[in-house]
Image (cartoon, rainbow, N blue to C red):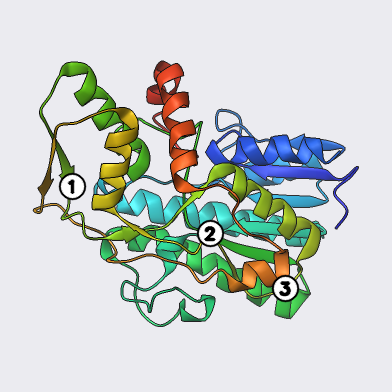
C-alpha cells in the first residue's frame, strides 16, 4: 500500500503509540487521519463504530484502541478488560469488512502467548498453552481477534494484518499508578525516592522475571512498514529480540535517575510471565523491520520527558 493520499482511521490514535503513528502517517503524506475520541464515540457500541467509519471513509484502518493496565489493573478489572477489548476489535474488524476497507491492521499483544512458551516466542507458539493468569483476559480477547481476522480472510478475502508488539515504553507513556506498566512505574518510584531522600524502594515480585521492551518510535515505524509492505495472514512479532530481568532493569533505571539507595522485593506479589523474548525473524523478513533504539538510550529519553511533563504524565487515568 502506498500511504500517500490515503484516508486512515486510527482507533486509539490519541494514545501512547497512536500519537506517534499518527505523526508518522502525516509525515508520509496521507490525505487524512481520523482519530475517534472516547468522549464522542464508544467503540464497544456497534452504532458508534458505524458512525466513526461513516465519518472517516478510510482506505486503511489501524486498530490500537484498548483497555489495558499493569498487573494491578489486570487483577482488579479482568472482566472489563476482556469484554471491552473483544467488543472493540470485533466491531472494528466487521465494519472494515462490511465497508470493504483496503487494509486493516490490528494490534495484538505479547500477553497472548502461553505462560510457558519456549523462548524466544515464535508466532507459531501462540496456541501451545494458556496465557499467564494475570494477563489472560486481555491476552485471550486479543488472540480471539486473530482468529476473527484469519476467518474473515478465508471466507471474505478481507485483508487484516495482525501485529504482536512487545512491551512499549518512551516519552508520552502513562505514569498514573492505576494503569502504568513496569518502566514508567519504576521511573516514578525511583524519581520520588531520590527527591524524598528515601533509602529504600520496594518493587513487586522477585525481580527474576524477564521482559523485552521496544521504544515507541520503533514500534510506530513497524506499523507503517506493515501498512506499506505486508498483506499476509500470519501474525508478526514486533520487538527487539532482547530480554532483561526486572532486577537488572530496576538497577539500570535507578542509576539513570540517580537513586543510590536499596531496592527490596515484595515476593508476595506476582512476577507475571516468567520470561518474555520474541523471535523477530518474521518482522525482519516480511517488514524489513529492526529496532533502532538501544534500551539505555530510550530510557534516558523517557526519564527526561517524565521530569519535564510530570503533571501531564501522571494525570492520565484511562487507556483507550
**Tag 1, which secondary structure?**
strand
**Dot 1 crowding, Cα within 10 Å, few <14, some 14–19, many 20+:** some
Mark closer to the observer (2, 1): 2
The residue carrying mark 2 is 239
Residue at 73% in and 39% down: 24
Residue 150, position as x, y percentages in the image: 64, 75
The residue carrying mark 3 is 232
Q: Is residue 263 above or below residue 150?
A: above
| Of the pair 305 and 63, the residue shown nearer to us | 305
Res 259 → quadrant: top left
Q: Specify whether residue 246 is in view.
A: yes
Residue 26, position as x, y percentages in the image: 79, 35
Q: Is residue 115 above or below residue 171?
A: below
Quick one: label 2 or label 3, which is nearer the N terminus? 3
**Which circle marks residue 204 in the picture?**
1
Quick one: label 3 or label 1, which is nearer the N terminus? 1
**Which circle marks residue 231 in the picture?**
none
Mark closer to the observer (2, 3): 2
Residue at 45% in and 80% down: 127
**Tag 3, which secondary structure?**
loop
Q: CA distance from mark 2 to mark 1?
A: 24 Å
| Of the pair 222 and 133, the residue shown nearer to us | 222
| Of the pair 207 and 310, the residue shown nearer to us | 207
Mark closer to the observer (3, 1): 1
Q: Specify whether residue 178 is in view.
A: no
Res 154 → quadrant: bottom right
Q: Is residue 139 above or below residue 170?
A: below
Amino acid at each position: 500500500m502506498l500511504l500517500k493520499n490515503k484516508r486512515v482511521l486510527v482507533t486509539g490514535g490519541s494514545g501512547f503509540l497512536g500519537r506517534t503513528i499518527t505523526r508518522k502517517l502525516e509525515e508520509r503524506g496521507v490525505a487524512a487521519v481520523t482519530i475517534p475520541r472516547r468522549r464522542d464515540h464508544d467503540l464497544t457500541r456497534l452504532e458508534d463504530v458505524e458512525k466513526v467509519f461513516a465519518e472517516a471513509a478510510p482506505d486503511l484502518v489501524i486498530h490500537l484502541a484498548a483497555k489495558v493496565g499493569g498487573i494491578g489493573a489486570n487483577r482488579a478489572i479482568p472482566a472489563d478488560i476482556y469484554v471491552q477489548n473483544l467488543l472493540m476489535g470485533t466491531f472494528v474488524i466487521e465494519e472494515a469488512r462490511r465497508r470493504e476497507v483496503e487494509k486493516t491492521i490490528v494490534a495484538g499483544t505479547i500477553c497472548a502467548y502461553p505462560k510457558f512458551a519456549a523462548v524466544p516466542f515464535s508466532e507459531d507458539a501462540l496456541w501451545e498453552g494458556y496465557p499467564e493468569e494475570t494477563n489472560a483476559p486481555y491476552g485471550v480477547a486479543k488472540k480471539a481477534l486473530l482468529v476473527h481476522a484469519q476467518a474473515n480472510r478465508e471466507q471474505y478475502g478481507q485483508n487484516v494484518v495482525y501485529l504482536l508488539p512487545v512491551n512499549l515504553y518512551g516519552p508520552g507513556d502513562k505514569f498514573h499508578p492505576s494503569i502504568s506498566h513496569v518502566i514508567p512505574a519504576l521511573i516514578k518510584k525511583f524519581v520520588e525516592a531520590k527527591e524524598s531522600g528515601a533509602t529504600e524502594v520496594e518493587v513487586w515480585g522477585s525481580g527474576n522475571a524477564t521482559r523485552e521492551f521496544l521504544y515507541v518510535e520503533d514500534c510506530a515505524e513497524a506499523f507503517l512498514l506493515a501498512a506499506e509492505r505486508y498483506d499476509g495472514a500470519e501474525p508478526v512479532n514486533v520487538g527487539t529480540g532482547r530480554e532483561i530481568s526486572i532486577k537488572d532493569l530496576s538497577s539500570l533505571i535507578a542509576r539513570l535517575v540517580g537513586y543510590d539507595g536499596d531496592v527490596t522485593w515484595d515476593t508476595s506479589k506476582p512476577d507475571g510471565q516468567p520470561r518474555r523474548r520474541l523471535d523477530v525473524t518474521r518482522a525482519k523478513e516480511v517488514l524489513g523491520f529492526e529496532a533502532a533504539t538501544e534500551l539505555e538510550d530510550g530510557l534516558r529519553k523517557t526519564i527526561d520527558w517524565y521530569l519535564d511533563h510530570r503533571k501531564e504524565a501522571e494525570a492520565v487515568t484511562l487507556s483507550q
